[in-house]
């Protein structure tokens, strides 16, 4: 059992909160793009005369970039540091946003969205990692969950932008508005300290100690204890290359992290986010505007339900929330499948209402469970020397799964129909429940060093 009293009695202070909030804004990049393309896709398709495959390509180029961006983060994060990687991501996102809005062709738009993907992939690997490394055990879950909250806020903000331009169909203004979250993140990051754990890993102990003193509200004794604990764990580590990720016991942690992200994506979350207006129109919504506003309601539910995770994740733990979320998602997906199956025998308005309610339940269940928890656990369960590389591999699994699901969703709708598509995602949820039950550890209330020490000694 971990010694719960081994962590310095850190006071929650404004430096930790401020650093976590600013770094979490990296989630706005992913969320805003996800929401924006949801509303802009049909208008883009009309401009460039895109087929179903063409629309899937526009959506998916961000995901291809996300996979590569996460990989590059693994190669560079230990060298440049988590903070610099987030700054670099903000700059790339700014460039990609401007290029997307000015795209003269579908090909140019796809290249621009690939650049956006590089930014989002890098940011989604570095930001949760940075937050985890400046946080204490007792609030780490809540603070890392701010990253997921920022994603949901970004999605919701993008939905409102979409609704504002739906009547004109001006997708260029929709895509161009993405410069706003990039500028906010870029300005905010310059004020933040480096991760003390990264500084110690680089031998910059004095700088790390100064930051730890600030984190521990000026208590030099507590900062020294924290410094010694990090140094002690580093001293018993070995290796730090990509090959070490596939050696026991780190390979066990990698399987857990990758598995959680595969479940996260293969329950179909981004099909609902990317294609929500299409889903609602197919379910009986009479106009594009009605479908967009139904989609906005999904964004509101997404944000509000994420607060459940912030409230409970450090109180009840990670696994109970995942169990509850999976049960809710499986039930909602089953209901969605039944609603579409009953088309023709039920009024279109009733099908639309049932679909909206089922999607609300699905989104809420995801938002307090598999939305934030994989991002949190990937930062908790790996040794420091391989943490950045391992987080990048896990993030690649997220974006790779996102790519596969998003690129196949519209085709699945055409081949097997919406009912069987949603039931397929429900089956993933059932398998996910078994995975969490059998393989996923509980990390609530344990310091990163305690988690690492136990992994190196026991393999879990």
Image (cartoon, rainbow, N blue to C red):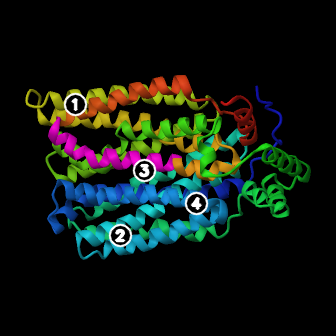
- Comes first in the chain, label 3 or label 2: 2
Which is nearer the N-term, disc 3 or disc 1?
A: 3
Tag 1 near tag 4, CB within 8 Å? no
Circle nearer the viewer, 3 or 1 = 3
Q: Which residues are magenta?
A: 394-416
Q: Nearer the viewer, mark 2 or mark 4?
A: 4
Residue 260: in sight, yes or no? yes
Q: Earlier in the sequence, mark 1 or mark 4?
A: 4
Residue at image location 71% in from the left, 42% down from the top: 448
Asked whether the residues under the numbered discs 1 and 2 touch, taking CB atoms below 8 Å apart as contact, a structural biologist would say no
Secondary structure, mark 3, is helix
Element carrying mark 4: helix
Q: Nearer the viewer, residue 1 or 445?
A: 1
Between marks 3 and 1, how big is the CA–CA gap? 24 Å
| Residue bearing the label numbered 3 | 399
Mark 3 or mark 4, earlier in chain: 4
Q: Nearer the viewer, mark 3 or mark 4?
A: 4
Residue occupying the point 11% across, 28% down: 346
Q: Would you place residue 371 above or below residue 127 in this image?
A: above
Label 4: which residue?
A: 75
| Pointer 4 local density, CA inside 10 Å: few below 14, some 14–19, many at least 20 | some
Disc number placed over residue 420 in the picture, else none: 1
Where in the figure is residue 185, as x and y percent of width and height?
55, 66
Q: CA distance from mark 3 to mark 2?
A: 17 Å
Identify the residue at the far right of this view. Answer: 221
Camera-nearest label, 1 or 4: 4
Q: Which mark is residue 112?
A: 2
The 10 Å Cα crowd at callout 1, few under 14, some 14 to 19, many 20 or more, is many
């Amino acid at each position: 059992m971990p010694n719960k009293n081994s962590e310095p009695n850190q006071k929650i202070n404004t430096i930790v909160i401020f650093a976590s909030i600013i770094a979490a804004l990296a989630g706005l990049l992913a969320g805003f793009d996800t929401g924006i393309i949801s509303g802009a896709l049909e208008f883009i398709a009309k401009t460039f005369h895109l087929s179903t495959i063409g629309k899937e390509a526009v959506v998916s180029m961000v995901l291809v970039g996300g996979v590569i961006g996460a990989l590059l983060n693994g190669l560079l994060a230990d060298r440049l540091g988590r903070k610099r990687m987030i700054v670099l991501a903000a700059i790339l996102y700014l460039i990609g946003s401007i290029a997307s809005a000015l795209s003269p062709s579908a090909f140019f738009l796809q290249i621009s969205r690939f650049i956006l993907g590089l930014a989002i992939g890098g940011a989604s690997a570095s930001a949760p990692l940075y937050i985890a490394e400046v946080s204490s055990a007792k609030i780490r879950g809540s603070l890392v969950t701010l990253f997921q909250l920022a994603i949901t806020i970004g999605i919701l903000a993008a939905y409102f932008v979409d609704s504002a331009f739906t009547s004109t169909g001006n997708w260029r203004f929709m895509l161009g508005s993405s410069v706003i979250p990039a500028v906010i993140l870029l300005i905010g990051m310059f004020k933040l300290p480096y991760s003390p754990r990264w500084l110690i890993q680089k031998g910059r102990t004095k700088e790390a100690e100064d930051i730890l003193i600030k984190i521990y509200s000026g208590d030099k004794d507590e900062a020294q204890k924290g410094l010694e604990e990090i140094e002690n764990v580093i001293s018993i580590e070995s290796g730090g290359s990509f090959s070490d990720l596939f050696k026991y016991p780190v390979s066990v942690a990698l399987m857990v992290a990758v598995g959680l992200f595969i479940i996260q994506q293969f329950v179909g979350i981004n099909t609902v986010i990317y294609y929500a207006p299409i889903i609602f129109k197919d379910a009986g919504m009479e106009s594009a505007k009605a479908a967009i506003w139904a989609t906005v309601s999904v964004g509101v539910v997404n944000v509000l339900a994420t607060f459940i995770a912030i409230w409970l994740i450090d109180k009840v733990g990670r696994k109970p929330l995942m169990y509850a979320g999976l049960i809710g998602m499986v039930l909602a997906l089953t209901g969605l499948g039944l609603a579409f199956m009953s088309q023709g025998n039920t009024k279109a308005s009733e099908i639309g209402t049932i679909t909206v309610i089922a999607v609300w339940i699905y989104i809420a269940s995801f938002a307090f469970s598999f939305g934030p928890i994989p991002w949190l656990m990937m930062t908790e369960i790996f040794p420091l020397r391989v943490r950045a590389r391992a987080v990048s591999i896990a993030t690649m699994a997220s974006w790779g799964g996102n790519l596969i699901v998003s690129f196949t969703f519209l085709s699945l709708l055409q081949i097997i129909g919406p009912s069987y598509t949603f039931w397929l995602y429900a089956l993933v949820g059932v398998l996910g429940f078994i995975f969490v039950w059998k393989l996923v550890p509980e990390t609530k209330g344990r310091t990163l060093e305690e988690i690492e020490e136990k992994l190196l000694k026991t393999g879990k």
